[in-house]
Image: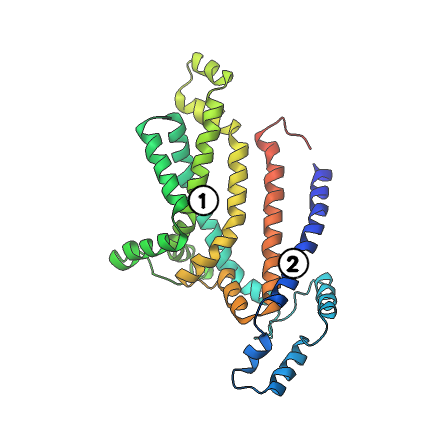
Amino acid sequence: MTGYALRRVLSTVPVFIFVALFVFFLLRITPGDPAIMIAGDQATSAQIETVREQLGLNRPMVDQLLAWAGQLLRGDLGRSVFSDIPVTRLIGQRLEPTAMLALVAIVFAIAIALPLGTLAAVRAGGVADRVVMAFAVLGFSSPVFVIAFLLVYVFALSLGWFPTQGYVPLSQGALACLHSLILPGITLALLYASLLARVTRASLLEVLSEDYIRTANAKGLTPARITIRHALSNAAVPIVTVIGIGMAALLGGVVVTETVFNIPGLGRLATDAIQRRDYPVVQGLILVFSSVYVVINLLVDLSYVLFDPRVRY
């Protein structure tokens, strides 16, 4: 397994190089000049050119790329062109809200999807199955911002159970932090719970038709024990894959959710940086998101051994 893990890690190098080049050139061909935004609307051409020279934007694109690549090899993501703060420090300051939001969302998604998907598979064709599948279709087709506004209207403005926006840092108490993340966590979780419930149902239906399940029934084992002990463990591989994909995709979903709920995480940082054409911050964030995506996929692949003894690396 060690050799497989090393090969997978090395295979990600070309992916990172492609992502870095794509982001670098995409930002520079996108309309908008950070020098104009920093100098202000009333700045003269000379003042704008001075800012552009200070930022190195007047240099040939190849020189800018080589300079940025040299910084990356030293582990330096550069400095924000607006705040002049190192990008690594900016990302570190915003990492906790996003990590906590993603964690709460994936826990909610698993807690909602696994029981519902299992119920739908066990009661396939019945009323419970139809209700769960209707929930899955509704959750998967509803835009994130619509779910967010509905939850805020009902549970924050009407009932007053949760705050409408904001984030309480973990240092001020785990319960207070969790309380501030309930609504944004559910908003993110519903989308992935819908997908996960459908995959759980499909995987379980396939396993429940196997001969060893009929043998377990003939031995007189209870339906609950057959489902939990034998069926779920053998249907785990596709379920774990979707959970891994969902965790990685959550990083994209946090951009909208953090904006709606005013959470100062990486999503808000990315939104602000894109609006300001803050090249180093956008490039650094995309590289961090790509790294998380690759690491999660690697962990998911390695976890297959735990659920299916037939898998060998």
| Left or right, 93 with reference to 10 | left
| Left or right, 57 with reference to 136 | right
Quadrant of the rendering where the C terminus is positioned = top right
- Taking depth in this image into account, of 156 and 196 the one nearest to the observer is 196
Q: Which quarter of the figure has residue 28?
A: bottom right
- Secondary structure at numbered mark 1: helix
- Residue in the picture at 47% in, 20% down: 209
Give the labeled residue for mark 1: 192
Camera sees residue 167: no
| Left or right, 262 with reference to 244 | left
On the image, the x and y values in percent for residue 310 come to 63, 26
Give the labeled residue for mark 2: 22
On the image, the x and y values in percent for residue 44 come to 58, 87
* Callout count: 2
On the image, the x and y values in percent for residue 287 come to 62, 58
Q: Earlier in the sequence, mark 2 or mark 1?
A: 2
On the image, the x and y values in percent for residue 257 come to 43, 57
- Secondary structure at numbered mark 2: helix
Which amino acid type is marked by label 2?
Answer: Phe
